[in-house]
Amino acid sequence: MQVTPIEITPSTPIKRSACASALADIRPGVSISRQAALHLICCPDDELPELLAAARAAIQRFKPGIITYSRKVFLPLTNLCRDYCGYCTFRRDPGDPGGHTMTPDEVLAVARAGEKLGCTEALFSLGDKPELLFPEMRETLRHLGYKSTLHYLEAMCELVLRETSLLPHPNPGLLSAEWIARLAAVSPSMGLMLETTNAALLAPGAAHDHAPDKVPAKRLRTIEEAGKQNVPFTTGLLIGIGESAVDRVDTLLAIRDLQERFGHIQEVIVQNFRVKPVIRMANWPEATRGDMLRVIAVARLLLVNVNIQAPPNLSGPYYDYDDLVDAGINDWGGISPLTPDYINPEKPWPQLRLRTAAKGFSLRQRLPVYPEFLPAVTARAGLLSEKLRAAADDHGLAKTTTTEIEMQIKRPA
């Protein structure tokens, strides 16, 4: 019998029985079914501790004892974007206050400053193909000497790779097979958030209204193509933007399907939408602590051998970020000693070491590509392989002389 959202409301006795049954059926190292995930993602509060215990056991089987993070600089190559997502404060139109495209000198200056602070990742974030909408961006690119934003991104990844010890990790939006291959030559990994498989969020007034690059099928196609080319890939879901609990499960299942087919999903991010006063969704309800814990736990039980991340600086007003450890994450994502989170600039990076240790884990710095994916990337001859080998320790984590810190991340000025 297919489970519907009505059948899995936490208040019904049927739901409680089904949730308990799903918990009892969990098997070590075996991914749960869709039906079990639907029950568990709406488990009642009194059964939540058992769900979290199952998720915690799963992470201890996968990667016991450590939680990783990537020490990075955040490079907002351009915040001009042709998408108008209802939750975004990053994007700008030409002429808007704060609208900017970085110059090569600016890129290199930030990368070199991060290098001095022990960073190993250069995270490139940018609007999706803004030149297709804005003649001003076409003129900027012409002045810089490039045909498109992707040509410019490729050149800046190569610049950082050549001139510093940092490793680029681009998040450029939708990509063709050709562009995945080109960017893979200058970066060991890349990413694209799937966000949701619910195409209804493209409707007028919904979160992805006027966002042509957020069509789920197009995003799945990019992730699939990366899999065909064996590119280590980061993806994930954005919760609290109008999707249902069923949508969350189906988004995770779409990611699981790609992982089972290609094995290239190095990391799944469970990111929660946070309200900001200047966005179209300023009055939207945020995901709760229970939402986050349930989604992360179900993600861990669906993706038993995949790294799961939740951004620590986006923890909600009613819970602390270290609560997320109990749900089965094994990574904090990119944390910077230099640059703010330009996507959520009002949310400073927290200090991680002591809170992580209090949960029984040690904090370790990784590279933008995870250790288990390093052999395939370093097998390719060239500068990228040389830089990766130089950056990695014997365990495939970041080779660093700083203790796990000396890393007391502070709020950027």
Image (tube, helix red, strand yellow):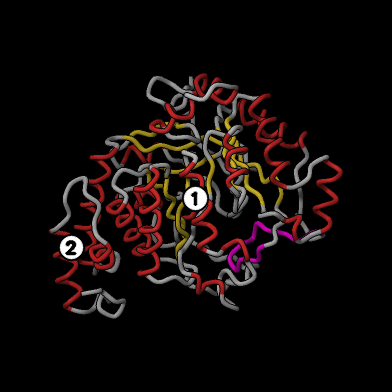
Viewed as shown, does residue 47 lie left or right of 182?
left
Residue on which the image places disc 2: 22
Give x and y (percent) for residue 84. Answer: 65, 66
Q: Earlier in the sequence, mark 2 or mark 1?
A: 2
Give x and y (percent) for residue 213. Answer: 61, 61
Q: Nearer the viewer, mark 2 or mark 1?
A: 1
Quadrant of the rendering where the C terminus is positioned: top right
Q: Residue at left 24%, top 66%? A: 35
Q: Is residue 21 above or below residue 336?
A: below
Q: Residue at left 65%, top 56%? A: 90
Residue on which the image places disc 1: 223
Quadrant of the rendering where the N terminus is positioned: bottom left
Q: In this rendered view, identify the residue nearer to me: 210 or 283.
A: 210
Viewed as shown, does residue 389 lie left or right of 325?
right
Q: In this rendered view, identify the residue nearer to me: 181 or 68.
A: 181
Q: In this rendered view, identify the residue nearer to me: 242 or 315.
A: 242
- The residue under label 1 is which amino acid type? Ile
Magenta stretch contains residue 90: yes
Task: Give the magenta part as a residue range.
Answer: 83-94
Give x and y (percent) for residue 122. Answer: 60, 36
